[in-house]
Amino acid sequence: MDRRTFNTTLVAGAALSMMGGLSFAQTPASRPAPARNVVLVHGAYADGSCWADVIPLLQQAGLNAMAVQNPLMSFADDVAATRRILALQDGPTVLVGHSYAGMVITEAGVDPIVSSLVYIAARAPDAGEDYTALAMKYPTPPASAGLVKANGFAQLNEAAFLRDFAGDVDPAKARVLYAVQGRISDTLFNARTTVAAWRSKPSYYAVSTQDRTINPDLERFMAARMKAKTIELEASHLSLISRPREVAALILEAAGRSPT
């Protein structure tokens, strides 16, 4: 199925749904269109290599997987980087976001080529929502205390990264991840989405029950609000590294595939 055919099919499916008296946005857990592509978007304090353990599992299942390299200079730049990778896909595509990248896929995921969304311990704001205000309704996660700002950029200090960001990752590997973490603009988290793709796309969510970067109860709230197919992993914020098989299995489900 080429992009034009997929777009036509998506519009027709939405129209049929509306004729039945229930909009597709109200049933995001509906079976997504089978996908052959996956675009993976990393969050703050990371880069595209954080998907290195997930990508081979997707490839073994016959999917084309590509990771975005976010500049982390502004939300608009990150959305643009994701859109550039989406433009390279040749058919239905699962869009996956970890952590802060949940905002990115919430904005970029309205692209008609996106067949479903997968959130991995990720932000999932509604259109125009102040995510910081939403997060303040829950106890502040410990990682927040380790944020260090200098010269207009921010990063996690080593103690917070190892303990609160990558708590269940092998310490030697976690130190490597700390060394290559993406430094973020200290205004990055001030942005707001203008749309909420999860209101119109089948959505999936992996909650990290041992998360010390985003409160797990906040993750559960966002997953429930979007009516996502939800799994819970006994993992740190970096479940995509500590639990790659379970994360890949959720992505495969979103792609209409069976895990290998």
Image: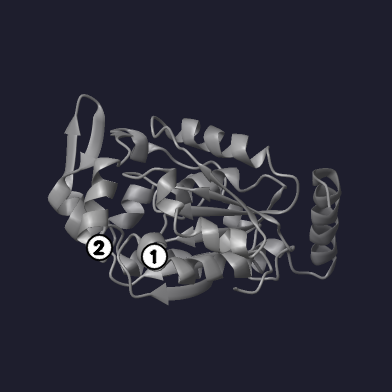
**Residue shown at 55% from the left, 39% from the top:** 82
User: Residue 194 at x, y = what percent?
Assistant: 54, 41
* Residue 249 higher or lower than 6, as above or below: below
Residue ID for mark 1: 219
Q: Nearer the viewer, mark 2 or mark 1?
A: 2
Element type where label 1 sits in the image: helix
Dot 2 alpha-carbon crowd within 10 angstroms: few under 14, some 14 to 19, many 20 or more: few
Please name the residue shown 44% across and 65% down the image: 244
Q: Find residue 140 and report its image quarter.
A: bottom left
Is label 2 in a helix, a strand or a loop?
loop
Instruction: Report x, y in % for residue 3.
Output: 80, 45
- Camera sees residue 125: no
Cα separation, mark 2 vs mark 1, equals: 24 Å
Q: How is the image coloured?
A: one colour
Return the disc, 2 or 1, that comes first in the chain's sequence: 2
Looking at numbered disc 1 in the image, what kind of residue is underneath it? Glu
Asked if the residue under mark 1 is in contact with the one under mark 2, i.e. CB atoms within 8 Å, the reply is no
Q: Residue at x 27, y 62 (%)?
A: 169
**Disc number at residue 170?**
2
Question: Residue 214, how many percent across, how many down?
Answer: 31, 59
Image quadrant occupied by the C terminus = bottom right
Amino acid type at image mark 2: Asp
Q: Tell me which residue sits at (16%, 45%) in the image.
A: 157
Report the disc number at residue 204.
Answer: none
